[in-house]
Every structure is written in structure tokens, then in C-alpha cells.
Amino acid sequence: MIFTETALKDAFIIDLEKKPDHRGFFARTFCAQEFEAHGLKPTVAQCNLSFNYKKGTLRGMHYQIPAAETKLIRCIKGAIYDVIIDMRPESPTFLSHIGVELTADNHRALYVPEMFAHGYQALADETEVVYQVGEFYMPGYEKGLRYDDPFFNIDWPLDVTEISEKDLNWPLLRMMTVGGTSSR
């Protein structure tokens, strides 16, 4: 695996180190030792699959406290624009975000540290995304941000065609408390 740290502290893009031959290629997608060597948490508590019927579908922006989750996100069919926001008040990249295109063709993954909001938009019909999550989902601890919050001004590549009612109703950042401190 090839680990590339992003502009957000502790968040990594992980590319495959392919070993090709006449049949195709082989590549490792996860190794606890390699994750630990890069200072990443290798815990996997759950694995999830998300299927999206239509391009333009948006899921997010989600995070969980105090049972904060790490995530390893990979698109296995179609393509997504994946966005993460650093929600750690002590971080030098607090409230900064990045977007990364993950596709079935580029085989790329995104490692999302604890206390990062995460969301994505499907760029193709019938897109599938696999998540390895480092903490169990706890409904009472789920938090979120609006995908269209003007504070972040996220440049989603497509118009939003589908979104859940829950994701439409997350508060704007200026109206919420982040990690025990008031924001804005």
C-alpha cells in the first residue's frame, strides 16, 4: 500500500501497490502492521456497504462523539466525490476540509481519522462504497453537518439529486457546539 498524507493532519489517501501478472493484479487493501507504522488506528469494528441508485446522491456529513470512528472508505463500483472535515478543536487543520475522487477504476481508499465529519456524492448511477469502521455505530452519538453549509462552501461536483431528510436537517456550524466548545 502507498500512504499519502493529505492537507488534513492524520488523513491519508491509500493507493494500491499492485503486483500485476497475466491474470490481472494482486494488491493488499488493509494491513494492521502497515497502518500502525503510519500512526493510524488499525481497528475494524464493522464493515458496511452503501449502494446508491442515482448519480448526484449525497450522503453526509456524519461523525460520532464521544465514540469517535475511524473509517477506511473505498468505492468498489462507480465513482464518488468523498469529503472529510476535521472536527478536532485541538488540530491545526480544525474545520478544514478536502475532497477526493474515489472510483472503482482508481482503487483508491481514504483513511478518515476520529472526529472527522464524512460524506460523499455518487458520481455515477449504481455506485457502491465499502467502509471499514473502527468503532461500533451508536445512534445516540451520531452528529452531522449540513452538506451545503456556507461556512465550508464545499464544491460538490454535481447537483444533489437525492439526500435523506436527516442529512437535510443537520444544523449549520454557527448554530452548533463542536467537541464541547461553541463554534462561531
Image (tube, helix red, strand yellow):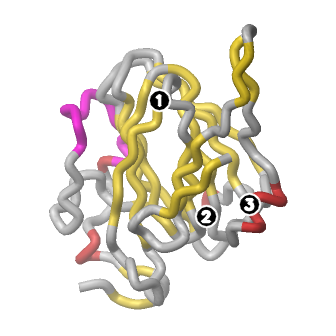
Residue 45 is marked as none
Question: Residue furthest toward the right?
Answer: 33
Residue 155 left/right relative to 10: left
Residue 140 is marked as 2
> Which of the 4 quarters of the picture holds residue 121?
top left
Secondary structure of the residue carrying numbered label 3: helix
Up-down relation of residue 2 to residue 19 (above or below): below
> Which of the 4 quarters of the picture holds residue 140?
bottom right
Residue 35 is marked as 3
Q: Is any atom of residue 164 visible in this view? A: no
Q: Which residue is mark 1?
A: 103
Q: Which residues are magenta?
A: 156-167
Residues at marks 3 and 1, CA–CA distance in whole angstroms: 22 Å
Inspect the magenta stretch and tell me whether residue 165 lies in it.
Answer: yes
Residues at marks 2 and 3, CA–CA distance in whole angstroms: 29 Å
Within 10 angstroms of label 2, few (less than 14), some, or many (20 or more) residues?
few
Q: What is the three-letter code of the residue carrying label 1?
A: Thr
Within 10 angstroms of label 3, few (less than 14), some, or many (20 or more) residues?
some
Dot placed on the residue nearer the N-terminal end, 3 or 1: 3
Dot placed on the residue nearer the N-terminal end, 2 or 3: 3
Look at the numbered discs 3 and 1 and tell me whether their residues touch, using CB distance below 8 Å: no
Dot placed on the residue nearer the N-terminal end, 1 or 2: 1
Instruction: Please provide percent x and percent y for residue 146.
Output: 30, 56
Task: Identify the residue at horizontal 74%, vertical 9% (top origin).
Answer: 23
Question: Residue furthest toward the front?
Answer: 21
Task: For marks 1 and 2, give the one nearer the viewer.
Answer: 1
Q: Relative to the observer, which residue lies in front, 100 or 142?
A: 100
Task: Identify the residue at horizontal 36%, vertical 42% (top origin).
Answer: 165
Secondary structure of the residue carrying numbered label 2: helix
Residue 86 left/right relative to 34: left
